[in-house]
Amino acid sequence: MNITRGVFISFSHLLKNVYLFKNMTESQLDSIGDISISKSYEAGDDVFLQSDSASAIYIISHGSIRIH
């Protein structure tokens, strides 16, 4: 897994295409982007487990995930 803090390509561009964030201003999206973490996973990696606490929101920018 690779982790990057802050803006990758354009967090605000990614976020404004997510329904949850669609009515936010560019400044608000930039603020969220500033505290965001980008993670990359390989096929078969666990993103989270059932026992994990709900402390984050996951936005899939490329690829797909399977929930079991």
Image: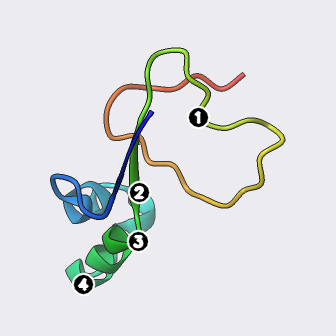
**The residue tagged with tag 3: helix, strand or loop?**
loop
**Residue 46, horizontal then vertical, whole percent:** 61, 27
Disc 3, disc 1: CB below 8 Å? no
Q: Residue at x 32, y 82 (%)?
A: 28
Other residues around mark 4 within 10 Å, as few (<14) / some (14–19) / many (≥20): few
Q: Earlier in the sequence, mark 4 or mark 2?
A: 4
| Residue 64: quadrant of the picture | top left
Q: How many marks?
A: 4
The amino acid pointed to by label 4 is Ser
**The residue tagged with tag 1: helix, strand or loop?**
loop
* Residue bearing the label numbered 2: 37
- State the mark number for residue 27: 4
Is 51 placed above or below 22 here?
A: above
Q: Earlier in the sequence, mark 3 or mark 4?
A: 4
The amino acid pointed to by label 1 is Val
The amino acid pointed to by label 3 is Ile
Q: In the image, is 48 to the left or to the right of 9?
A: right
Spatial CA distance of label 4 from label 2 is 18 Å
Q: Residue at x 74, y 35 (%)?
A: 49
**Residue 8, horizontal then vertical, whole percent:** 22, 54
* Residue bearing the label numbered 3: 35
- Check the image and name the residue furthest to the left: 9
* Residue bearing the label numbered 1: 47
Spatial CA distance of label 1 from label 4 is 29 Å
Spatial CA distance of label 2 from label 3 is 7 Å
